[in-house]
Structures are given as structure tokens and as C-alpha cells.
Image (cartoon, rainbow, N blue to C red):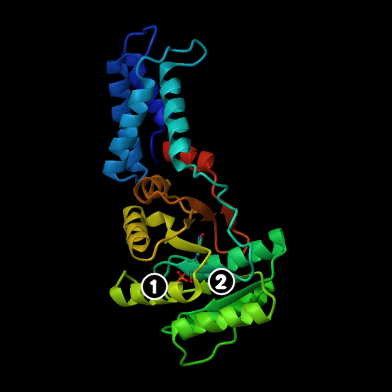
Amino acid sequence: MFENLSERLSGVFDRLTKQGALSEEDVKTALREVRVALLEADVSLPVAREFVKKVQDQATGQAVTKSITPGQQVVKIVHDTLVDVLRGEQDPGALKIDNPPAPILMVGLQGSGKTTTTGKLAKRLKEKEGKKVLMASLDVYRPAAMDQLAVLGTQIGVDTLPIVPGQKPVDIAKRAKQQATLGGYDVYMLDTAGRLHIDEVLMNEVEQVRNAVDPRETLLVVDGLTGQVAVEVAEEFEAKVGISGVVLTRMDGDGRGGAALSMRAVTGKPIRFVGLGEKMDALETFEPDRIAGRILG
Ligand code: GDP
């Protein structure tokens, strides 16, 4: 569907005279192509601009290596810079779950894949780290969402907090904490209610829950296919509730993954996991290399 960036850049450099080093003019021309490629991959304009500037500073004056073409060389610089920006300080898959029971708050818009991701993550914690996990749905608006989590729990062999109709989210959170403590759980995961759009009521509710349990991790689940919208959602959640990381879902789709770069650049928060399908084991630790390759096409 898209022309590959490497091919595009070779085209650009073929038209330029061969020189011993990448000149400012060569780099500028090449970076115009890079910017277009980033925008096509759904990176937001300000982020693409800033990124291109970073690459420009690095590329100008670099000696052209004999073994690769100038086009390949610029692609490599772009790739390495992408990985650099995308990589967080810590191991993305290492969740803060010492000092049990550790609360993990799952937040995000309705339909982002929050409940599915809660199940996937619980399964991963149980199977890969041998943790005893309790899941609780705080979605008092949609009884179907509560049932959905219970069904997932049965499917993956993870306990869910019994449903008590009529309880407020903050009270369910407190009950989850109590049960997790009494039951000797390592982790309890709170699947908060989502809305179609961000609104005050939703944010206040999440804030109340956050204050009641003091989560070790607050993971924002966003649909990786929604591009710029995902970035706006992340900014809002970071500003109002504070998040410790992001899970990008639907990365099995044909999106180009540019949202990952924008998200990282705009919020400064690490992407921790990516969702790669509907199945309970379709969750992987975020790999900057892989997304960089995908953004470059
Ligand atoms: P919630 O409203 O945010 O809790 O969203 P759900 O967890 O109910 O997910 C909504 C739909 O997206 C469901 O049909 C999920 O199976 C699907 N889904 C969730 N994560 C992924 C993913 O990573 N890839 C794909 N293809 N589908 C996903």
C-alpha cells in the first residue's frame, strides 16, 4: 500500500551527486521523504517535525560508509533514532508488583480493549511470573462488562471478585483490596469503566478509585489503530489521573504504528505491552525495534 521508505530514499539519493559525506542539502531532501513517511504512518505533525530535526542533527556531516548507500544510511539513522525515542528507561514488561497485594489500575475508553487486556495481563502474570491474581470489574454501568471479565477469568483460571449489584466503583475497589489481602493474592487488577469519550464523571471516578487503592501501576489501554485520537486520550489521562504506562491494542491490524511514537513523545510515558489479537495469549512486551521497522515500512 505504501512505498517503502528505503526505496523512496534510494530514489532521492540517486538523483543527487555522490559525495564523500552527507551534505546538508542531501539530508534535507531525504528528510522531506522521512517526514512524509512518518505522517503516512500516523505520526502527528509536531512530533514528526521534531523527530526529523533530531535526525537532521545526527545525519549532517556523517561520512558516507562505502558498504551501504546514502539512502540506506539515512534509513539506519532514522531507525536508530526511532528506537531511541521509543525505548523507555525500564524493561517495559517488568510491572511493579512487589509488596503484595499490588493494585494495577486499568484505564481507557470503552472499546479500546481494556477488559481483554486485563485478562491477557492476568494470564501472563499467572503463567510467566507465578503470581496469584484477582481481577475485579468496576464497570457498574454495563453489567455485560462485569460478566465478560468473569467469563475471561474462568477461561484463564484467574479469580474474579464476586459481583455485588449496586456497589459504587470505589467501594468495589476497596472490596477487591480487602479480598486480595485476606486471600493472599500477589496482584489485584481493577478494570475500570470506559466511556466513548473522555468526560468529567469518568475521570472523577477513576481519580476516586486511584486515591482509594494507590495503584502500583496505572496502565492506559488505547486502540493503536486510532492514531492521533489515541494520543489525545493518553494526554488527558496522564494530565488528570497520571499513568505509568500504555498498552497499545490492535497492533495485529494494518495500522502503521505511528501512534506509538507520538504517544511516547507527547506523554513521555513508556509503552509497556502491545495487543496482537483477541486471544488471551495475544499480548507481547513492547519491542521498539519492531515498531520502528513498521513505521518505516
Ligand atoms: P473494552 O470496552 O475496552 O473493555 O474493550 P474489550 O476488551 O471488550 O474489547 C473490544 C473488542 O476488541 C473485543 O472484541 C476484543 O476481542 C477486541 N480486542 C481487544 N484487544 C485486541 C487486539 O489486540 N487485537 C484485536 N484484533 N482485537 C482486540
Where residue 33 sits, quadrant-wise, is top left
On the picture, is 4 further left or further right than 133?
left
- Tell me the quarter of the image containing the C terminus: top left
On the picture, is 25 further left or further right than 41?
left
Where residue 108 sits, quadrant-wise, is bottom left
Check disc 2 and give the amino acid type.
Answer: Met
Secondary structure beneath dot 2 equals strand
Q: Position of residue 182 (x, y in %)?
A: 67, 81
> Could you tell me which residue is drawn at 62 percent across and 67 percent down?
122
On the picture, is 148 further left or further right than 139?
right
Depicted 204 relative to depicted 50: above or below:
below
Alpha carbon distance from label 1 to label 2 = 16 Å
Q: Is residue 152 visible?
A: no
Depicted 124 relative to depicted 167: above or below:
above
> Could you tell me which residue is drawn at 48 percent across and 51 percent down?
271
Residue carrying label 1: 207
Which residue is more in the foreground, 264 or 69?
Answer: 264
Residue carrying label 2: 189
Q: Position of residue 180 (x, y in %)?
A: 63, 78
Depicted 265 relative to depicted 247: above or below:
above
- Tell me the quarter of the image containing the N terminus: top left
Question: How many neighbours does mark 1 have within 10 angstroms: few (below 14), some (14-19), or many (20 or more)?
Answer: some
Check disc 1 and give the amino acid type.
Answer: Glu
Q: Position of residue 84 (x, y in %)?
A: 46, 36
Mark 1 touches mark 2? (CB < 8 Å):
no
